[in-house]
Amino acid sequence: MVTNPKRRITLDEIKSHPFLLMSEKVNIYREIGDGSGIILDYEIIQKMKIKFFLNEDDIDCDVIINNIKNYLHNKITTIYYLMLKEKQDKEKYPEKK
């Protein structure tokens, strides 16, 4: 624990810490606080890394997050938004599988 508040980890740093991003028990689902309306779902980001980019050392959770935040149009953001849409549909229509 760090007693000096100026040296402590920030809440945003905690939310994007690799330990939390890789934990299957932690599901942080939030909008970025800049008014952009971008939704970051860390459960999806974690699943993407494991399912699609496990063998790609140059693509980690931070790269995925930065691609989403920077509105890039590529395979990373395409996979992310397809998985987000699927999750939202399952939450909205739980009877469909």
Image: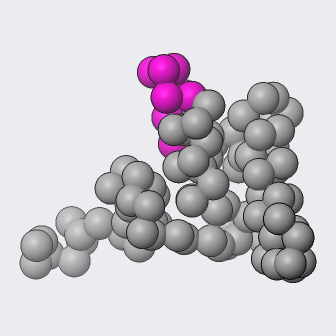
Taking the image as shown, residue 32 lies to the left or right of residue 85, namely left
The residue positioned 85% from the left and 59% from the top of the image is: 85
Instruction: Tell me where the magenta segment starts and ends, as one range.
Output: 53-61
Q: Quadrant of the C terminus?
A: bottom right
Q: Position of residue 8 (x, y in %)?
A: 23, 69
Q: Is residue 30 left or right of residue 11?
A: right
Nearer the observer, 5 or 63: 63
Residue appearing at x 65%, y 73% in the figure: 30
What's the residue at 81%, 70% (across, down)? 90
All told, the count of numbered labels is 0
Quarter of the image that includes the N terminus: bottom left
22 in magenta: no
x%, y% of residue 88? 82, 69
Q: Is residue 26 above or below residue 85?
A: below
Seen from the viewer's position, the closer of residues 2 and 68 is 68
Q: Hey, which quadrant is residue 39 in on the image?
A: bottom right
The secondary structure that dominates the magenta segment is: loop
Q: Is residue 90 above or below residue 49?
A: below
Q: Where in the figure is residue 66, as x and y percent of width and height?
A: 63, 42
Question: Would residue 34 be seen by someone viewing this image from the given angle?
Answer: no
Residue 52 is at least partly visible in this image: yes
Q: What colouring style does the render use?
A: one colour
User: Does residue 49 appear to the left or right of 31 in the view shown?
Assistant: left
Residue 89 position within the rendered picture, expressed as x and y whole percent measured from the top left: 87, 68
Left or right: residue 60 versus residue 13 is right
- Residue drawn at (81%, 43%) of the image: 71
